Each structure stands twice: as structure tokens, then as C-alpha cells.
Amino acid sequence: LKTYIDLGSVPGGTSRNWDSYRTKIGFSPEYDHATEKAILTDPQTSGGLLIAVEKNGLGKMKDVLNQFGLQNFLQPIGEMVAKKQPAIEVL
């Protein structure tokens, strides 16, 4: 994935989405976040590919995904917290 992003092989809507979201996303300054920016603002992810689950329901969600052979698609990427600025932080 990183190779394609580094080569600029991303949908055109990605940069337009970044322009819309950039003020709501904060990145730690330690390294280049080009890959995370491309993933977070990828227009192809619209349509329900992300699932929000309460912490106490994570185990059950894992069980359901495993039951249907979808364990390869289980990758927690964050957690919901009280609203603050920036709205999203990538550390």
C-alpha cells in the first residue's frame, strides 16, 4: 500500500477529501504521515467499511468476524473519545 501511495497512485478524491478534513486531523510530528493521510481520506472507504464497537463489545465483534472467516479483516484502528481539537490524532 505504501508503495502505491508513494508513487501517487491514489484516487483523485483523496486530495479533495484531505482539503476538507485537514483541520480536524492532527498528526504527531515524528514522521511523514503520507500513508495515513491517504488512507484516512480515501474516497473509496465511504460506504460502511469501518465498524464502531464499544470496548466491552470488542470480544464479541472478534468472535462474529472469526465465525464468518473474516478474522483477516479485524484491525482496530483507534478509539472514540470525548470531542476535542483536533478531532482525529494519528500518533
Image (cartoon, rainbow, N blue to C red):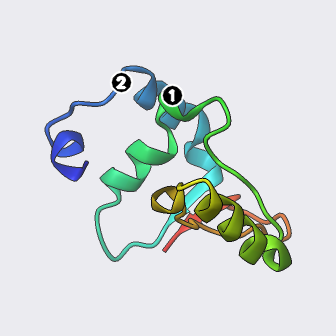
Q: Is residue 24 left or right of residue 30?
A: right
In the rendered structure, are the residues bearing label 1 and label 2 in contact, judged by CB atoms less than 8 Å apart?
yes
Q: Which picture quadrant has residue 7? A: top left
Q: Nearer the viewer, residue 49 or 46?
A: 49
Give the image location of residue 8, x and y in percent: 20, 33
Tell me the kind of residue under disc 2: Pro
Rounded to the nearest whole Å, what is the CA distance between mark 1 and mark 2?
A: 7 Å
Give the image location of residue 34, x and y in percent: 32, 52
Residue at figure coordinates x 73%, y 77% from the top left: 59
Q: Is residue 23 left or right of residue 15?
A: right
Q: Nearer the viewer, residue 69 or 44?
A: 69
The residue most toward the top is 12
Give the image location of residue 4, x and y in percent: 19, 40
Q: Is residue 30 left or right of residue 51?
A: left
Give the mark, 1 or 2, whose residue is nearer the N terminus: 2
**Crowd rating for badge 1 (residues with CA inside 10 Å; few <14, some 14–19, many 20+):** some
Residue at figure coordinates x 48%, y 74% from the top left: 91
Look at the numbered disc 1 and give the secondary structure of its residue. helix
Q: Which picture quadrant has residue 52? A: bottom right
Residue identified by numbered label 1: 43
Give the image location of residue 2, x and y in percent: 23, 51
Tell me the kind of residue under disc 1: Pro
Look at the numbered disc 2 and give the secondary structure of its residue. loop
